[in-house]
């Protein structure tokens, strides 16, 4: 590892840590400031004030914001995210199980989108007026404009009507496709544009004039040059995977962080909301860090610009 790459790595790692700290801390503050808390339903059910006060004391909700925040920070140092008021279980156990499911869904969707989108982008760039490009381009534009939740609903209707996909809770295929199809379309459009620009670059035009085979120009040289701009937006794509998975998980009953976050928000479960936000921020930070490091390895100029 060169000194410039090491310096780049530590700067990006520090930025990732700051991002996680800001997101998780903001969640604690905003959830605390929102109307109501975990004892609201108990109060609305007609419980007396003493019972509500005892429950607030048990959950630590009677403490001022700075005290709750301090206890939460101290707990993180011990890998203790507190206890869920709704589930009456440790938050770390709940979010750990759901985070694994969300990571599985996100990794599957991103892998599928990459395997489908990047080769299609190369093929449509090679023959922009060919039959494949004329079919793929409008379909990709339509899928890019389609929110994941709409895609999940459409696939659910298709699955119910045809039986091609399972709609059983916990089945991976439907939510993975709902996330992967818009991402594959986005990657296809980006890869197609980047590859077309690479094929028109002077060095590749000169290589073609020297007799380098077309397939080598496309699959080796153009691919290598087009990776830089495509990797540049991979951090955003990873972010869209996790943000889109929240709605998709809810629609398809996938047991991930998205559904858990929804239940925590509805139940005003302070520490569970904070735990979900913390894990989500960690996922996003790791994804962006990996995308930045990949760009820096492919193109050393990235280290100069982002340092």
Image: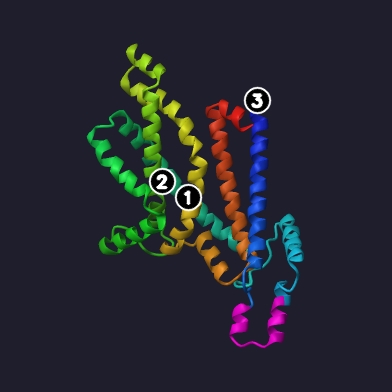
As drawn, 36 above or below 108: below
Q: Is residue 80 magenta?
A: no
Residue 53 vertical placement versus 181 (above, below): below
Q: Position of residue 152 (x, y in %)?
A: 38, 58
**Residue 149 coordinates in the image, percent (x, y):** 40, 58
- Looking at the image, is 295 positioned above or below residue 244? above
Asked if disc 2 and disc 1 are in contact, CB closer than 8 Å, the reply is: yes
One can see residue 307 in this view: yes
Residue appearing at x 34%, y 61% in the figure: 156
Q: Main secondary structure of the magenta part?
A: helix
Residue tagged 3: 2
What residue does disc 1 label?
A: 241
Pointer 2 residue: 183
Q: Quadrant of the C terminus?
A: top right
Closer to the camera: disc 2 or disc 3? 2
What separation in Å lies between label 2 and label 1 (alpha carbons)?
8 Å
- Report, in whole angstroms, how far the alpha carbon at label 3 lies from the one at label 1: 32 Å
**Element under disc 3:** loop
Magenta region, residue range:
40-56
User: Does residue 43 belong to the magenta stretch?
Assistant: yes
In the drawing, does residue 139 fall left or right of residue 173? left
């Amino acid at each position: 590892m060169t000194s410039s790459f090491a310096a780049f790595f530590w700067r990006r790692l520090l930025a990732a840590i700051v991002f996680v700290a800001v997101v998780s801390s903001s969640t604690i503050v905003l959830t605390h400031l929102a109307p109501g808390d975990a004892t609201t339903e108990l109060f609305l059910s007609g419980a007396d004030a003493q019972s509500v006060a005892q429950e607030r004391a048990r959950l630590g909700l009677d403490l001022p914001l700075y005290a709750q925040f301090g206890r939460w920070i101290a707990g993180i140092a011990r890998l203790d995210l507190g206890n869920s008021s709704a589930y009456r279980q440790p938050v770390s156990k709940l979010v750990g199980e759901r985070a694994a499911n969300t990571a599985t869904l996100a990794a599957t969707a991103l892998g599928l989108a990459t395997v489908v989108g990047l080769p299609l982008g190369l093929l449509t760039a090679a023959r922009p007026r060919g039959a494949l490009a004329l079919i793929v381009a409008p379909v990709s534009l339509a899928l890019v404009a389609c929110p994941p939740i709409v895609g999940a609903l459409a696939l659910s209707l298709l699955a119910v009507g045809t039986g091609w996909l399972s709609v059983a809770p916990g089945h991976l295929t439907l939510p993975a496709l709902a996330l992967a199809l818009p991402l594959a379309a986005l990657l296809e459009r980006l890869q197609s544009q980047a590859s077309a620009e690479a094929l028109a670059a002077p060095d590749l035009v000169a290589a073609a004039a020297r007799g380098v085979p077309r397939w080598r120009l496309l699959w080796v040289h153009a691919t290598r040059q087009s990776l830089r701009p495509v990797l540049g937006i991979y951090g955003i794509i990873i972010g869209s995977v996790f943000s889109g998975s929240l709605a998709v998980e809810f629609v398809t009953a996938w047991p991930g962080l998205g559904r858990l976050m929804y239940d925590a928000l509805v139940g005003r479960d302070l520490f569970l909301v904070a735990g979900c936000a913390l894990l989500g921020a960690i996922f996003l930070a790791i994804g962006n860090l990996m995308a930045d490091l990949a760009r820096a390895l492919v193109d050393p100029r990235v280290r100069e610009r982002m340092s």
